[in-house]
Image (spheres, rainbow, N blue to C red):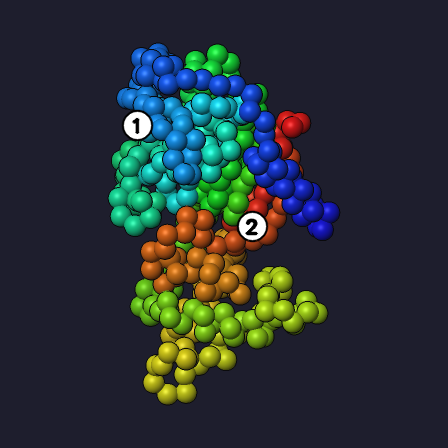
Amino acid sequence: MHRRISSVVVLAASLSILLAVAPTAQAASASQCSPLSSLQLSQTTISRATWQAATASVPQHCRVEGMIGPGTIGFVVQLPTSWNGRLYHAGGGGYVGFIPDASAALAKGYATAATDTGHKGTGPLDGALDATWALNNPQAVIDFGYRAVHVTTTTAKAIASAYYGRGPKRSYFEGCSRGGGQALMEAQRFPGDFDGIVAGAPAFHWTEFMQGFNWDSRAVAATPIPLEKLPLIERAVTKQCDASDGLVDGLVQDPRACRFEPAVLRCQGADAPDCLTMAQIEALREVYAGPANSSGRRITPGFPAGSESNGGWDVWISGVPSRRRCNSPSRTSSSVTSSSTIPATTHSRSISIRTRPS
C-alpha cells in the first residue's frame, strides 16, 4: 500500500516539475493567429481566433474558440507566442458546462485546451451543478461521458500544428472531481491522447456515484444539516479519531478506521448551534454509511468522517454553493500507476497515470 501511494506521489511530483520547468521550444507571431479562424478540421467550426496581449498573469497568446459536432462541444485552445512544445488539457468539475481555466499552464509556456463537454450550464459554480441539458439529449450525454475531452484534444493538437508548424512533443491532462473521472476515461478509452495524466478525487462509475448523491439528498431533505454545524461535527470526529494513528496532530489519518458515533452531539433539549437533533444524527449516519440496495449491500462508500468543514460538505450536504471546483468528497482511497486497469471505486483522492515514458 505504502509503495503504491509513494509511486503516485512521485508521478504527480514529476508532472508538477515538468509543468514548472519545461523549456521554450517554439515561437509564433500575431500574424499567424487570425488565419486559424479559417482552418478546416473535421466536424469542427472555429468561431474566432484572436490575439491576446500579455497581462500580469498570462503571456501573449492566440486564443482559438470553436465548436465540435455532431453535438455542441465548445472548446478553447490557447497558444502562447513562446511555446514549450507541450500541450496541457484542463479537466472540468461537476457536470462541467463551462470552459475550465487553464491559464496557470499557459503562463508556463504550454499550449492549452479545455472544453465545456458539449453543453452550457446555468446556475452556481458557472453551471457545473446543472444537469438539465441531459434530458432527451443522448448526444450530449455521450459527449459529456467520454467523447468531448478526446475530440477536443485531437482538435487542439491539429490547431497547434497549424500554428507552430508542428504538433506538441508531449501532452498532459489534469483534472479533479469530474475532471478526475475524465482523466480515467481518457486513460481507459484513448490512452494515446496523453503522455501523462493526473486524476484528482476522480468522480467515475457515474451511475453508482450519482446513487450516492441521491442517497445523501434524501437523508437530509427533511432535516437539513446547517453549514454552521459542520465545524462542530468535524471537531467531534477529530476528538474521537485523531489519536487512532498514534499521533495527536489534529488530523484523522485514515477516515476508514474512524467509527464516529454522531450521538455524542445529541441535543439535551431543543435544537441549538452546539448540538444535533436526533433527526440530524440519523441523517448524518446515513451520509457516512452511503447507499445500500434492498439486500443491504453497499452500492458506494459514504462520505468519510473528518473533513466535514472543508471536504465538500458545504455544497453536497448543506447545499451552500462554493467557489471551489474540486470540492467533492474523497469517498475512497486508491492508487494506480498504469492505465491498464481502472479500479471500480467511486471517488479516490489522487491518481497519477503515466501512459508513455516522459
Total labels: the figure holds 2
Badge 1 crowding class, 10 Å Cα cut-off, few under 14, some 14 to 19, many 20 or more, is some
Position in image of residue 148 (x %, y %): 40, 29
Residue occupying the point 57% across, 36% down: 20
Quarter in which the C terminus is drawn: top right
Left or right: 237, with 59 as reference point: right
- Mark 1 and mark 2 residues within 8 Å of each other at the beta carbon: no
Residue 122 disc label: none
- Read off the residue under disc 2: 349
Graded by Cα atoms within 10 Å as few (under 14), some (14 to 19) or many (20 or more), the crowding at tag 2 reads some
Extreme-right residue of the structure: 3
Say if 192 sits above or below 179 in the image: above
Q: Which residue is mark 1?
A: 72
Q: Position of residue 167 (x, y in %)?
A: 51, 17
Left or right, 223 with respect to 300, comes to: left
Give the residue type at disc 2.
Arg
Q: Which mark sits nearer the N-terminus, 1 or 2?
A: 1
Residue 181 shows in the view: no
Q: Secondary structure at mark 1?
A: loop
Spatial CA distance of label 1 from label 2 is 31 Å
Residue type indicated by callout 1: Thr
Which residue is at a point 34% across and 81% down the rendered structure image? 271
Residue 311 on image: x %, y %: 47, 58
Relative to 272, 326 lies left or right? right
Residue 113 location, quadrant = top left
